[in-house]
Amino acid sequence: MARITGGVTTSHVPAIGAAMDQGKTGEAYWSPLFKGYEFSRQWVAENMPDVVIMVYNDHASAFDLEMIPTFAIGCAEQFGIADEGWGPRPVPEVEGHPELAWHLAQSLVEQEFDMTIINKMDVDHGLTVPLSLMFDQPDAWPCRVIPLAVNVVVYPPPTGHRCYRLGEALKTAVESFDEDLNVQVWGTGGMSHQLQGPRAGLINSEFDMAFMDALGSNPEDLVMKPHVEYLREAGSEGVELVMWLIMRGALNAQINELHRFYHVPASNTAVGHMVFENP
Ligand code: DHB
Ligand code: FE
């Protein structure tokens, strides 16, 4: 059977991707950030998943205001590269896992999570920057990736509790797939940041630290947090953190935290990154 062996959380700041694409990772501004991923790159190389379920959000690259799925799963063979800002990154296309993705879609719908099914989609920095942070700049990504897109861009995003429950359903879904697969779930986005308005540039390290402290051992302290608390404490884009709760829900109740990194700032964002394994 397939099993979830671990989870990763990481911010997905587009400027990180641009720094890698433009050969700037050694610069004084960027090198402390990439140091924080050295452990994780080695860990993932030694614990290479067959499939990563990538919980991420699109930033109006594939969806726009005309269509806004709350939860969507990518069932395609391949996903092209798109982006806002700097434009499509020069990174490999993303290979999906249609058999597992369709199984997840069916199991999630049977568990009453009515997923939007996507058979053609390009993916942006929300998905490609975490891949680059963990796998550097290979000619082809070393594993398959199933995009699980969450609307955190247009109000109303799903609640943290709903996200956590989706993670739990994802665990059930993966564990009922009849093939030996090593699956990791990655939750991306966050931590505190606000990109627009009078509070643009907001960072709240105290909030971020408390969130990381609770995520591993007391996620129930986080799941009832209302949207307005994310907005007030972590800025308008800080609500991306509900995606970390999908990852957490998909892991065991007891997990081992292997690595934690926090860095302020990368562009306008407080970068948070954690690695967990299921014992
Ligand atoms: C930034 C962060 C994001 O999460 C994003 O989607 C776009 C920009 C930033 O800090 O610049
Ligand atoms: Fe974002």
Image (cartoon, rainbow, N blue to C red):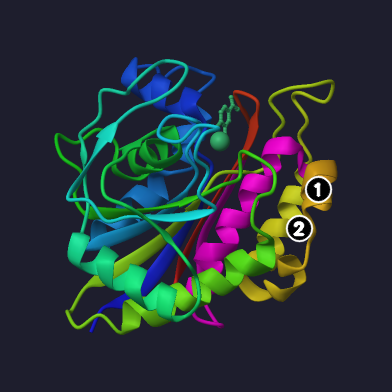
Q: Quadrant of ligand 2?
A: top right
Q: Amino acid at mark 1?
A: Glu
Graded by Cα atoms within 10 Å as few (under 14), some (14 to 19) or many (20 or more), the crowding at tag 1 reads few
Place of residue 125 in the rendered image (x, y in percent of width and height, measured from the top left): 42, 33
**Residue at horizontal 59 percent and vertical 63 percent from the top:** 245
From the viewer's perspective, is residue 157 above or below residue 29? below
Marking on residue 206: 1
Q: Note whether ligand 1 is within 8 Å of mark 1.
A: no
The quarter of the rendered structure image containing the C terminus is bottom left
Mark 1 falls on what kind of element?
helix
In this view, the residue in front, 218 or 155, is 155
Which stretch did the figure color magenta?
A: 234-262
Place of residue 104 in the rendered image (x, y in percent of width and height, measured from the top left): 33, 70
Distance between the alpha carbons at the discs numbered 2 and 1: 6 Å
Q: Is residue 43 left or right of residue 202?
A: left
When asked about the image quadrant of residue 217, the answer is bottom right
Mark 2 falls on what kind of element?
helix
Q: Amino acid at mark 2?
A: Ala
Place of residue 60 in the rendered image (x, y in percent of width and height, measured from the top left): 49, 30
Q: Is residue 238 magenta?
A: yes
The quarter of the rendered structure image containing the N terminus is bottom left
Do the residues bearing badges 2 and 1 touch, measured as CB atoms within 8 Å?
Answer: yes
Residue topped by disc 2:
210
In this view, the residue in front, 88 or 16, is 88
**Residue at horizontal 79 percent and vertical 21 percent from the top:** 197
**Can residue 251 be seen in this snapshot?**
no
**Residue at horizontal 19 percent and vertical 36 percent from the top:** 138
When asked about the image quadrant of residue 191, the answer is top right
Q: Is residue 182 magenta?
A: no
Place of residue 248 in the rendered image (x, y in percent of width and height, measured from the top left): 55, 68
